[in-house]
Amino acid sequence: MKNAMNLMCKFCLLTGLLLMPLAALAQGTVRGTVVDSNDEPIIGASVVEKGNARNGTVTDLDGNFTLKLVKSKTAVVTYIGMVSQEITVADAARKVVMKDEQGQLDEVVVLGYTSRARKDLTGSVGSVGGAKLAAVPVASAAEALQGKIAGVQVTTVDGAPGADVNIRIRGNTSVTQSNEPLYIVDGFQVGNINDIPPTDIASIDVLKDASLTAIYGAKGGNGVVVVTTKSAKEGKITVGFNGRTTVAHLSKKLDLMDTPQFVGYQYDRAAANGTRSSWAKPFRGNFGNPADLADIYRRAATHDWQDEVMGETPLNYSANVTVGGGSDKVKFNTSLTQSDDKGIIMGSGVRRTNLNIKLLAKLSNNLELTLNPRMTYRRDIGAGGDNIGSGGIIDVLRYRPTNGLREFAFWDPRTVDPDEEAAFSYTNPKSDIQTNTQKKHSYNIVNQASLAWTPIKGLMLRTEAAYNITFSDVNRFYGPLTRVGKGHNSQPVAQVTNRRRMSYTWTNTATYNMTVADRHNWSFLLGQEIYSSEERVNYQMNRYFPRDISAQKAIDNLNLGTPYESNSSLSTPDRTASFFGQAGWNLAHRYFLAATFRADGSSKFGAGERWGYFPSVSGAWVISKEKFMKRVKWLDNWKLRASWGLSGNNRIDSDLWRYLYAINSTGGPGFGETVEQGEKYYGFGSGDKLANPRIKWETTVSRNLAMDISLFGGRLQLTPEFYWKTTKDLLYKSDIPTTTGYSTQVQNIGQVSNRGVELSINADLLRGKDYVLSANLSMGFNKRVIDRLNDTDDVLWDQNNRWKSSYNDYCLRVGDELGLIYGFVYDGLYSPEEFDFDPNRNFLAVPKPLTFDKDGRRVSGTVINQVSASSNSGEATLPGKIKFKDLDGDGYITEKDRTVIGNTNPKVQGGFGVSGQWKSFDFTANFYYMLDFDVNNATAYALSSSTKNRNEFTNVLGKFTDHWQYVDPATGECMYKNYYLDNSVESYIGMNAGKSLWNPADVVNNLTQSYFIEDGSFLRLQDVTIGYTLPAKLTRHWGISKLRFYASASNLFIITGYSGYDPEVDIQTGLTPGMDYNRYPRNRAFSLGVNLNF
């Protein structure tokens, strides 16, 4: 790859030399000095005669230039990353102060099909310039957006390198379908922006209301993210380099039992698992006599699997080279980026290579050609938190910290229980990961081209097309000692999945702008677009490979194993035909009106519902331009905006509306061909869904009211906004009568609303000759409520499949918010005082009898638990066991005693930051926060319980040293088993006096309960950067125009009361968000970098 980078740099330099304009003989002369905002000379700035690109020069080491003009009296001064300026022959020798291009980006907003000055906007747009994005030490543009725009929630799935980044704009609008926004890169739709380097981006504009998203019709219902990559600029060839080296480590560890604590707990686990007569002897063969434990394990090492598996401190890097320049006829910009991001968990990481080329050629005075090929290569190692090793992060945390007596020379294997020996035969997490591998290679190639013709003033006709092909290969290998390998005769297993996806877009637009009577400004857009995509998936799983085979050899030679599963699937093409238009008018930039309309036809719907229509209207009034506001000197701008519009969501599975029949030699005939990640395919669809030809679009009605305010000469800018979005015809898999031959059908069932308030503040706090200090704040309040379900249900239930609880753990109820967690209310532990002990029956623990009032509600007595988290309901109502609140007062704990125990929706979320400069030093700091929301900490539950099979020696959280005990730690005597006490009640109760936690060995079933619902509120220092730019007087002697060094840190600290690794968890699903289970932990990273321009 290093050779490829060198070759690309040489190619770009050679191309640039061929494109450089030649100086021409002239008559008029312009001269001057070009400096930046710090009064430092700019070396290599391009000075070109306007209209005659062959006549030009560049500034020298002191920023000076002289140019004789031939055809014009004006010259244009340009420099990469700065706003171009014009000077004339009439000007005396002058100083040309170049301003950073970011100021212009704040004034011009790219809306996809068009661009518009911010002062002329009537809709809601949040924008971030490329300079701010590039300052964040991350590899993904999506991650860099976090906390930058009000109302935009950006969450990474977990801390894995290259993990997916979910973006939500003003809340989730769908409950079962995708809530991802539409991503537009340089005018064309893409799947996501996770692999676009921030250094390639000129700006990101987030379109938040329907006055702007309706032009995208069926795809704009979740908002639109418009990315504009850096474009070609005319002038001298320039070369830039940005490099960063990063070291990372685990930001937080969970407290687990150490070796002595673990061994002591194992006696209680064995007591819960075995009978009173036979459990002790074979178990002592594993760990020793209780009276000897202190001596045996006093100096015994504890295997800290968090350190051994997650303790990597990888050295990562990112490097970007850009080359650009050219004449007014032909100009180009090329960017090559490579990054290597190894994970803190051994055997994980992602490597990316991105190439982005833009070539602009002016074929004539009114005809321009743009070519924009892009390529991304990505190699992923590891499979995220769920699939690290055989059982994910959870299995790493639960693995025993010691092998007991097996680690000592005096161990006698004849003393152990053969039934428990199997648990010791599993490989440990470290070797498990080494023999349980996943590698993914993916390529994404995009070819874009556009041709723009301006036949008359104000009219532009543009045709543009893009072809995108993505292909990936996922190779998975399980060694013989892994859980999967053991399930196949203790021999290796290999899986290979090949995925190919092709799509194309062709767009034709006509835009016309005109001004009437110098006051009435009109703009018009007409367009037509077609889009098509399809995907093919091939899957093969073979088993029974030779035990000593390597992972790569097995993948390369599947024939060495025995075929077990295979499938080939071709998805139904997704095709859309669209027609759209837009009209805008303003009177002297004071009063504004705009309207859009789009018609979309999609192949995902039946003939009667195939077309959707999406209008919008908006208006604005610049109050500050009225005569009665002239005396208000401290108010620079006061603009009122309002909008209404419709947009849609067609991100649904194909073929839900019809039957498709396919013949497959493995599976036979079937219905549907929809591909869902993670499933195995046999050529037929699920038989439980009845096709529905009446499926309609999910449609979102959006209303927006906002103000743009600028005060004190632009030093303070505020934008408060209020919005109300209503999404109707929600798609949901509803139950239907089984007399149809099916149990469910996807239907349009109801309506959900999002109401919220946003506030954006930008302040120029201090500004002097040598210093500047600015700050920004964004916050959003959103409430998402279910307005209506179908005609028969007021409540719908769902279950988070990651957790697999015994009951549905999320509910949808009319009038409530989405994302409510449903479960039992934890009420402490059963105490001995709630029981009678019968000495005639070995001290049987009998719950005190129940008494009721005349209304049938419990007055006294012990509540009987009939939904035990234990394997046997009869074991639930005993001293030291978990107790739930009896909400209906009937004296029994049943599923009717469940209620809402958590709300995963943050009441407020946003970010704030400060940035400044003092002489040659600069700094930035960005914070991100989410307040008042709940997280379902299922990881903590898993570490507070046993497994379904109590024969496995699993570890638990360290705080469970305070658990109720069944075994006297001094003697090893089992005092309590199920219902009975073998010794005096007083001794047993005295041994557990003051114990606050249950015995984890008793809990083997997953019951969602309030004990594990935690407040996830947090404030995170997302990143902080300090930089120093060497004086130009020094670097110009080296031919360098800018040389900056910087140091940065990310995730430096987080303020939260959450007990897990991190409270920022997955928000991907509309029905079951906020679940923390098997998540790859986040790291803390420190970086050193350099910015270099020639």
Image: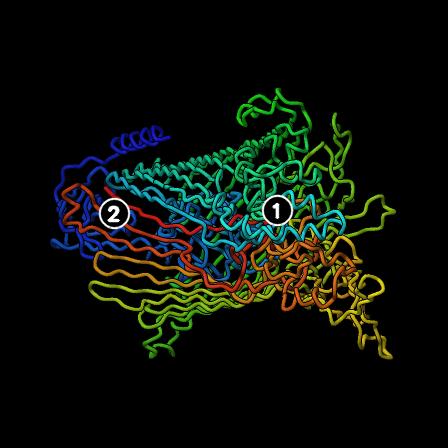
Question: 182 above or below 873?
Answer: above
Question: 997 above or below 313?
Answer: below
Mark 1 vs mark 2, foreground winner is 1
At 51% from the left and 45% from the top, the residue drawn is 303
Question: 1030 above or below 358?
Answer: below
The N terminus appears in which quarter of the rendering? top left
User: Is residue 646 something that shows in the picture?
Assistant: no
Residue 567 lies, in percent from the top left, at 67, 29
Residue 41 lies, in percent from the top left, at 17, 51
Relative depth, front residue between 709 and 247: 247
Residue 654 lies, in percent from the top left, at 67, 41
Residue 292 lies, in percent from the top left, at 59, 50
Relative depth, front residue between 742 and 858: 858
Disc 2 residue type?
Thr
Which numbered dot is residue 288? 1
Which numbered dot is residue 409? none
At 70% from the left and 57% from the top, the residue drawn is 1007
At 66% from the left and 41% from the top, the residue drawn is 603
Which residue position is annotated with label 2?
Answer: 78
Disc 1 residue type?
Gly
Q: Is residue 77 left or right of residue 486?
A: left
Give the mark nearer the N terminus: 1 vs 2.
2
